[in-house]
Image: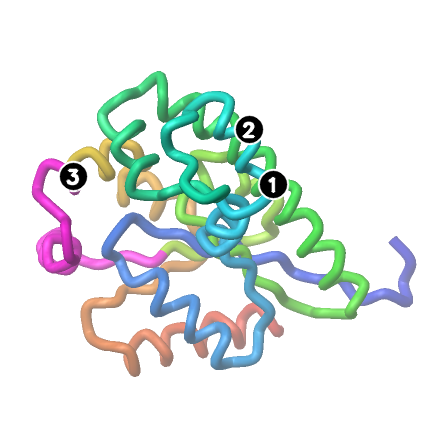
Amino acid sequence: MSGTSPKMTVLGLTGSIGMGKSTTAQLFRDAGIALFDADAAVHMLYRGAAVPHIQKRFPDVIVHGVVDRAELAQAVIGNTEAMADLERIIHPLVRNAELDFIESQREAGSKLIVLDIPLLFESGADTLCDKVLVVTAPEKIQRDRVLARPGMTPDKFEDLLGRQMSDAEKRAKADFIIVTDKGIEDARQQLSKILQKLNA
């Protein structure tokens, strides 16, 4: 790499369901840092590029030319083979979107960007990152937050947890950790210290 172009740091942001990752992602946006939202990318794919591929495997989940996410959830939750098929369709498309984002930000001269990816380690996307930040919270707080969501049941929660790497494993792989049990201002202060380290 030439000495004239400053290196861009790619920070992976992840955390299990209910840990406060979405709130932390918003704190990065508030700080003016470019952020790739994998969930938003999937939602776009469900209205575009992924539709023909999903239609082939799950014809009943396409409604008015887009993927009906409730129908798709019915088709894959609790079905390991169907879930694996869906991941084989979606993961490469999301990876292309991630790579496009990284390249466009590099061309724009960004110093730091964030990849907000729920299944960062599980999908192998951590290999795109220079550093990884894991968002965590005590187990009871996580459970209370998730079960308060509309339509969530203890069984659904357990199924989701079963498909994610454990919080302990994620923390062991992290370069940085934010604990979100003391409110948003406390998380913002933790993030501020991490940004100081990254900018140094």
Labels 1, 3: front one: 1
The C terminus sits in image quarter: bottom right
Helix, strand or loop at label 3? It is helix
Do residues under tags 1 and 2 come within 8 Å of each other at their CB atoms? yes
Q: Quick check: 15 above or below 107?
A: above
What label does residue 49 carry, if any? 1
Is residue 53 a member of the stretch shown in magenta?
Answer: no
Judge whether residue 175 can be spotted in this image: no
Labels 3, 2: front one: 2
Q: Amino acid at mark 3?
A: Lys
- The foreground one among 191 and 17 is 17
Q: In percent of the image, x 24 and y 38: which residue is there? A: 160
Q: In percent of the image, x 62 and y 49: which residue is there? A: 98
Q: Quick check: 15 above or below 25?
A: above
Q: Earlier in the sequence, mark 1 or mark 3?
A: 1
* Residue underneath mark 2: 53
